[in-house]
Image (tube, helix red, strand yellow):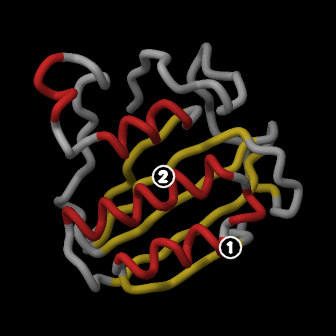
Amino acid sequence: MRPAVALELLATPGEVSGVRRALRAYGIDVQLCASELVTNVIRHVGEGVPVTVRVWREEGGRVRLGVTDPDPRALPVLVGEAGAGAEAESESGRGLALLDALAVRWGVEQEAGRKTVWCELFTDAETIAVTPRTPERPGRRRRSAGALGHPSARS
């Protein structure tokens, strides 16, 4: 099914706030995750690369967000939990930890010449379309609000 929102842009710091504005109707969790994923493209793939941000509704009240960039080799890596040793002092990895805490599940789809980092979140936004159901990880049925601080591991 077609995404309800498909934004094509160049990954620059100025575009991050535009992505947040464009996704305002989907709630703060979707905005935060989209901001973090686009920022990761800027930091780890390069400023000015083409990016596509897609959002659509999954069955069961979830929203799926996908950010596609042209480098299938620059994969996101979730570092240890915040507050754990020297990693707590690191400037890197906090955005993905935020995404991991907010999302029901997340992952990476690699294709020839591109990759999509995606996540699924619960939201109250009612303005987006429905797509086919995907399997859900056991024990992750809670709403994303208040999910911060819970240990988790995703694949």
Q: Position of residue 9 (x, y in %)?
A: 45, 85
> Which disc is residue 5 wearing?
1
Identify the residue at image location x=39%, y=23%: 153
What residue sits right under mark 2 in the picture? 118
Identity of the residue drawn at 81% across and 37% down: 60
| 51 left or right, relative to 64 | left
| Left or right of residue 34: residue 70 | left
Residue, far left = 86
Quadrant where the image shows the C terminus:
top left
Left or right of 140? Residue 88 is left
Amino acid type, label 2: Trp
Residue in the foreground of this view, choosing between 122 and 97? 97
Find the residue positioned furthest to the front: 89
Mark 2 surroundings: few (<14), some (14-19) or many (≥20) residues within 10 A: many
As drawn, 30 above or below 1: above
For residue 42, side relative to residue 1 (left or right): left
- Compared to residue 72, the image places residue 89 above or below, namely above
Q: Earlier in the sequence, mark 1 or mark 2?
A: 1
Q: Nearer the viewer, residue 40 or 71?
A: 40
Judge whether 124 appears above or below 50 on screen.
above
Kindly state the secondary structure of the residue where label 2 is placed: strand
Residue 8 on image: x %, y %? 50, 84
| Residue located 55% across and 35% down the image | 102
* Viewer-side residue, 44 vs 6: 44
